[in-house]
Structure formats: C-alpha cells, structure tokens
Amino acid sequence: MTRAIEIDEYHQALSPSDREICELLAAEIERELPDATGKVWHAHPVWFLDGNPIVGYSRLKHAVRLLFWSGQSFDEPGLAPEGTFQAAEARYLDVSEVDRETLIRWLAAARDIQWDYEHIRTNRGLVKRTEF
C-alpha cells in the first residue's frame, strides 16, 4: 500500500514529537488494515474500508488523538467514548505511550466491528451496525 501524499504532508506540518507518534500510528494502521484506503478527510488522516471511516488521528491542543469510529463497541479497554455516536479515542503525548499490542487489538476490532457512517445521511442521522 502506498500512503497518500496528503498524509505525509500532514505529518510534515507537525512538531517532531507529534510526527513520531503519527508516523507510528500510520505504519501500524497500514500494516494491520492493508485493504483500507487512507486520505486526509476533514483536515485529518483517516482510513476507510468500503467507504466507511474506520480509524484516524488528529493533533489536538495537548495531544495526538487516535479515533475509532466504532470504538465504543469494541470489547477492549483503554478507549474513551467520544461524541454522540459510537466513536472512541485514545490520546498520546509521547510515542512511548503507544502500546503496539493494544493498538493491534484495536485495529483488529475496527476491521470486524463497524457502524455504517457512510450512509448516515440516508439513514436520517442514525448509525447502523454493519455485519462482516
């Protein structure tokens, strides 16, 4: 898989410590979700499976946030609910805080457990669980 140039450009605009976190996250996402398509969406790197957003990250004021759109449905510790749908997040201040084994488990869950965000408008604002 070739990384989208806009993701590399996003990384280049970050501080060295934030870039290190994001490079690690991108590498693990691309390795564990080889069928996912990555692009910058709403100004942040996001990976999609079949048009559905699965995982992405963004630089917040005090941390790098890793977001799983269906993360509240994972049977995995370490993710905090985010927003009003099914999303959950983890935040990192340093690359040493990224536990690769945990990240790999989260990415496996993200592949298997998805809510249909792609069709949220046609579903009148409701997200429905996608079966895989």
Image (cartoon, rainbow, N blue to C red):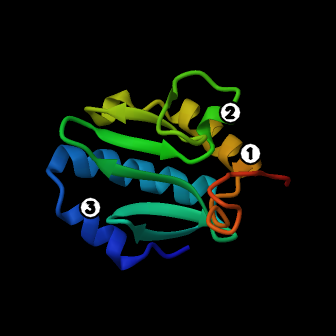
Q: Give the distance between the C-alpha atoms of the residues marked 1 and 3, in whole angstroms.
A: 28 Å
Q: Which residue is mark 2?
A: 74
Label at residue 113: 1
As rendered, which of 42 and 124 lies closer to the eye? 124
Q: Give the distance between the C-alpha atoms of the residues marked 2 and 1, in whole angstroms.
A: 7 Å
* Residue type pointed to by label 3: His
Rendered-image quadrant of the C terminus? bottom right
> Tag 1's secondary structure?
loop
The quarter holding residue 21 reads top left
> Tag 2's secondary structure?
loop
Q: Residues within 10 Å of mark 1 (few under 14, many from 20)?
A: many
As rendered, which of 51 and 24 lies closer to the eye? 51
Q: Residue, x 23% and y 46% (percent of image)?
A: 18
Q: Residue, x 19% and y 35% (percent of image)?
A: 62
Q: Which residue is mark 3?
A: 11
* Residue type pointed to by label 2: Phe
Tell which circle, 2 or 3, labels the residue nearer the N-terminal end: 3
Along the horizontal axis of the image, is 88 left or right of 93? right
As rendered, which of 91 and 102 lies closer to the eye? 91
Q: Residues within 10 Å of mark 2 (few under 14, many from 20)?
A: many
* Residue type pointed to by label 1: Ile
Along the horizontal axis of the image, is 21 left or right of 16? right
Disc 2 to disc 1: CB gap under 8 Å: yes
